[in-house]
């Protein structure tokens, strides 16, 4: 008898371990849920859960918007979705190529969804996969197991509409800004914008595309009229314009400080210490990300 | 003279790097150097030298464009005798990033450039005198991902703009005094290790391999570049123009094309 109890207990413990711990969710609007990651840097100590990932439930099924930074995080995200709805997962949308947003894709392969992304996403995934997996193995070791690049099966060149039954998702591919693969999503039913990393709230915006391009796209996003916005990082905002203005102020001062430094014949190293210094107290992870932004942007601007 | 890395050393090196890559938290590893030292400077004595001064970030923000400066302190040791400086990045797949050939026209040697780091590595400057003595300084830099991957640029545009040069001499110039000059050349500096998305193979190496500077046709500075030098190679160096004149540069790439530029240096 005792042996049976022990065996059953053992089995219970075993099955609980197999079940991934579901991620916590915020309900943002009717049928819209978001999980907020922590503001950690992509470096040692990174855990693969730093951005906003979420989903939209329609009458026909579910669309996932970004999948998390590892296969394991993706699994925990899928568990969280399954606690809310049993409807089929029809789409996994990636807002851009960055690893914190896409490495959870593999956790959704069993649902056989359409993977949706910018038309440049597949190529960007290919050119980055070696470097990304090497760095992630170094940072996370075993915790990175199972993570892989799952490329889009549906590429968006300009705009596209996904039908979830009682609601439509309007997708827009953007020119190079935060990255060369930025895609935004608007839910028609609740007028909710998923900006991906075209909008950062709280966390310092990081540039891996084109600073001037991002300034232009930020300007364009300001023309949208939506009820709420899920940014790539940070809390959901209702005042989109104020959040975009914040970001625009940082991007503009960064551009103008770098241009001044170049025209004075200074060196990149000194601009890394001084450019956009007036923004220092307004953002999380500023020291790290701002220096990286200068390093990434300065050499290109020397050719203006 | 510098010999190319022998096959045996390469194998030993590859084995060494493989064993390092499994480290959970890699750091610049001092164990790679003895292998490289044997490959590049077999059986030669290299003396540590504090007259070679290196400046770089402890942790590079971008492995693709790591700012790196070398200065020789002329008042110390054998600085004045150094005629050639090799820049070596231990953990890069191609270790030799550049070789700088010095002349007296440079005055006190002071150079800033930007280099690539594939991973955490020691970066070294080995100075060589005319009679073959070697002096070295090294610093560790933490960095990632500077040599492989990540080509988002359009090939036609890259080819069209390759070789465009920008050069500047800080003014006003005081003749006979130290004068900073900046040189940048547009070039992808393809390592041969980046993926070709069409063929799924690797893009062939395509890089600037030489930049030769003269002042009034007299040699000033001669640089052998390799793919460890960043995309759009950047060199800022001091020289001493004795009178007004023309600073000229001729650069060549590994496909045999050459590019020239000159500026009129007035007071």
Image: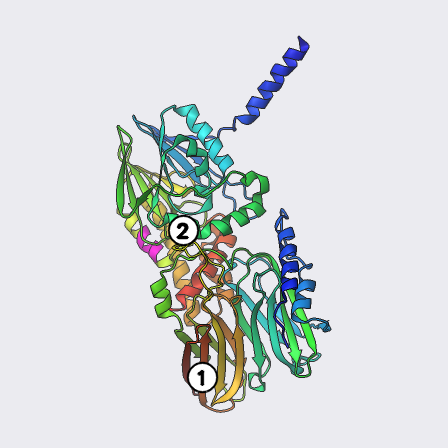
Q: Which mark is residue A124?
A: 2
State which quadrant residue A191 falls in. top left
- Label 2 – label 1 distance at C-alpha: 39 Å
Residue B188 figure quarter: bottom left
Can residue A293 be seen here? The reply is yes
Residue B253 lies, with reference to residue A37, above or below; the image says below
Q: Which residue corresponds to mark 1? A: B248
> Which quarter of the image is occupied by the C terminus of chain A?
bottom left
Secondary structure character of the magenta stretch overall: helix
Q: Secondary structure at mark 2?
A: helix
Residue B113: % across, % down: 52, 70
Q: Position of residue B158 (x, y in %)?
A: 37, 65
B260 and A51: which one is in front? B260
- Work out which quarter of the rendered image holds the N terminus of chain A and state it: top right
Q: Is label 1 in a helix, a strand or a loop?
A: strand
Q: Residue at x 53, y 77 (%)?
A: B223
Asked if the residue at tag 1 contacts the one at tag 2, i.e. Cβ–Cβ closer than 8 Å, the answer is no
Relative side of A249 to B207, left or right: left
Residue A193: % across, % down: 32, 39
Query: Which is in the foreground here, disc 2 or disc 1?
Result: 2
The span picked out in magenta is A213-218
Q: Residue furthest front?
A: B7
Check disc 1: other Cα within 10 Å, few if <14, some if 14-19, many if 20+: many
Q: Nearer the viewer, residue A114 or B100?
A: A114
Q: Any magenta on residue A215? A: yes
Q: Residues within 10 Å of mark 2 (few under 14, many from 20)?
A: many
Tell me whether marks 2 and 1 sit on the same chain.
no
């Amino acid at each position: 008898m005792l042996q049976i109890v022990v065996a059953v207990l053992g089995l219970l413990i075993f099955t609980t371990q197999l079940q991934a711990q579901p991620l916590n969710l915020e309900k943002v609007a009717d049928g819209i849920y978001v999980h907020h990651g922590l503001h950690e840097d992509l470096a040692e100590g990174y855990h693969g859960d730093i951005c906003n990932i979420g989903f939209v439930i329609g009458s026909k099924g579910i669309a996932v918007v970004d999948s998390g930074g590892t296969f394991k995080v993706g699994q925990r995200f899928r568990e969280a979705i399954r606690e809310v709805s049993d409807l089929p997962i029809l789409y996994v949308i990636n807002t851009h190529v960055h690893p914190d947003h896409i490495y959870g894709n593999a956790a959704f392969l069993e649902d056989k969804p359409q993977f949706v992304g910018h038309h440049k996403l597949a190529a960007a995934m290919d050119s980055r996969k070696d470097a990304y997996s090497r760095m992630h193995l170094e940072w996370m070791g075993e915790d990175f197991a199972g993570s892989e690049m799952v490329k889009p099966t549906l590429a968006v060149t300009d705009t596209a509409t996904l039908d979830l039954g009682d609601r439509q998702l309007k997708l827009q591919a953007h020119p190079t800004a935060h990255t060369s693969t930025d895609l935004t999503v608007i839910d028609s039913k609740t007028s909710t914008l998923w900006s991906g990393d075209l909008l950062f709230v709280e966390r310092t915006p990081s540039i891996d595309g084109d600073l001037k391009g991002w300034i232009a796209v930020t300007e364009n996003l300001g023309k949208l009229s939506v009820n709420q916005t899920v940014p790539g990082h940070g809390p959901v905002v209702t005042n989109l314009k104020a959040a975009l203005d914040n970001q625009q102020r940082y991007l503009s001062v960064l551009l103008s400080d770098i241009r001044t430094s170049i025209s004075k014949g200074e060196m990149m190293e000194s601009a890394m210490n001084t450019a956009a210094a007036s923004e220092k107290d307004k953002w999380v992870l500023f020291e790290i990300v701002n220096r990286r932004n200068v390093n990434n942007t300065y050499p290109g601007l020397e050719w203006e | 003279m510098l010999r190319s890395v022998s096959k045996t050393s390469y194998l030993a090196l590859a084995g060494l790097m493989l064993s390092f890559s499994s480290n959970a938290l890699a750091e610049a590893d001092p164990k790679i150097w003895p292998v490289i030292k044997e490959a590049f400077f077999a059986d030669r004595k290299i003396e540590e030298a504090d007259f070679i001064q290196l400046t770089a970030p402890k942790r590079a923000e971008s492995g693709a464009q790591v700012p790196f400066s070398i200065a020789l302190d002329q008042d110390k040791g054998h600085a004045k005798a150094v005629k050639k400086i090799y820049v070596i990045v231990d953990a890069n797949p191609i270790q030799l990033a550049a070789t700088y050939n010095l002349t007296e026209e440079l005055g006190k040697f002071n150079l800033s450039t930007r280099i690539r780091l594939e991973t955490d590595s020691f970066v070294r400057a080995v100075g060589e005198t005319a009679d073959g003595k070697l002096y070295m300084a090294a610093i560790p830099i933490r960095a990632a991902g500077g040599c492989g991957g990540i080509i988002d640029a359009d090939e036609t545009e890259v080819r069209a703009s390759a070789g465009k040069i920008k050069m500047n001499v800080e003014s006003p110039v005081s003749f006979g005094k130290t004068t900073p000059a900046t040189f940048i050349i547009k070039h992808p500096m393809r390592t041969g290790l980046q993926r070709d998305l069409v063929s799924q193979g690797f893009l062939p190496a395509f890089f600037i391999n030489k930049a030769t500077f003269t002042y009034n046709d007299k040699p000033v500075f001669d640089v052998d570049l390799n793919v460890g030098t960043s995309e759009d190679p950047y060199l800022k160096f001091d020289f001493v123009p004795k009178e007004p004149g023309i600073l000229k540069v001729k650069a060549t790439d590994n496909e045999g094309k050459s590019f020239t530029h000159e500026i009129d240096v007035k007071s």
